[in-house]
Image (cartoon, grey):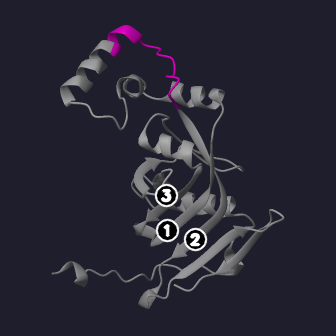
Amino acid sequence: MSIADLRQVYEKSVLLESSLAASPLEQFSTWFDEAVKAGVVEPNAMTLATADAEGRPSARIVLLKGLDDKGLVFFTNYQSRKGGELAARPYASLLFFWPALERQVRVEGRVEKVSAKESDTYFESRPLGSRIGAWASPQSQPITRDELEARTRQLTESLGEQPARPPHWGGYRLLPDRVEFWQGRPSRLHDRLVYQRDEQGHWQVSRLAP
């Protein structure tokens, strides 16, 4: 079978304006809970797309680690490629794909760093190995496997059981201004409903052609 012949029929659900929550974050929370209940593997995995100062895009999978009435939170090395791109252009796009439910969610908006306290709280909740790893990995920089493992061994010995959060590591919060919910439908006539903020900051909902 050729790649062109790979197809999936979408017919599990529908998405109507009458069923939407008042805000996109409330609607996202509902869909996220349904993905968890459906047993989706890593339902918090999301594609994060950023762009550098010249507008060249890059994308990678990161994990959603917080959701509140302001936005969606993830954590990373501030000196990584994504960190540099967000410093140059503090806007990003997130994409969640839950194939078991035939759903996607696209989130766009401005990105800001979370508070040091919020980063500290999450860092302290991580397994010890992950905390050591945040110190050991010069993320996005060239390194050999031997060098990485040697750094990890040395820092495991020197940092002890309660390493502090590295100053170059912490969280970001994406503050959405556009959120699209996509529900697969038969014959590729999918449901696409998008929330977008108007000039007064109110959410407006519209349906997009599939």
The location of residue 106, given as percent across then percent down, is 54, 65
The location of residue 43, given as percent across then percent down, is 46, 55
Residue named by callout 2: 181
Front label number (3 vs 2): 3
Looking at the image, tell me whether mark 3 or mark 2 is earlier in sequence order. Answer: 3
Front label number (3 vs 1): 3
Specify the farthest residue to the left: 1
Residue named by callout 1: 104
Looking at the image, tell me whether mark 2 or mark 1 is earlier in sequence order. Answer: 1
As rendered, which of 84 and 92 lies closer to the eye?
Answer: 84
Looking at the image, tell me whether mark 3 or mark 1 is earlier in sequence order. Answer: 3
The location of residue 143, given as percent across then percent down, is 25, 31
- The segment highlighted magenta reads 155-169
- Are circles 2 and 1 on residues that touch, CB within 8 Å? yes
Q: Amino acid at mark 1?
A: Gln
Q: Is residue 205 magenta?
A: no
Label 2: how many Cα within 10 Å (few below 14, some 14–19, many 20+): many
- 93 displayed left or right of 17: left
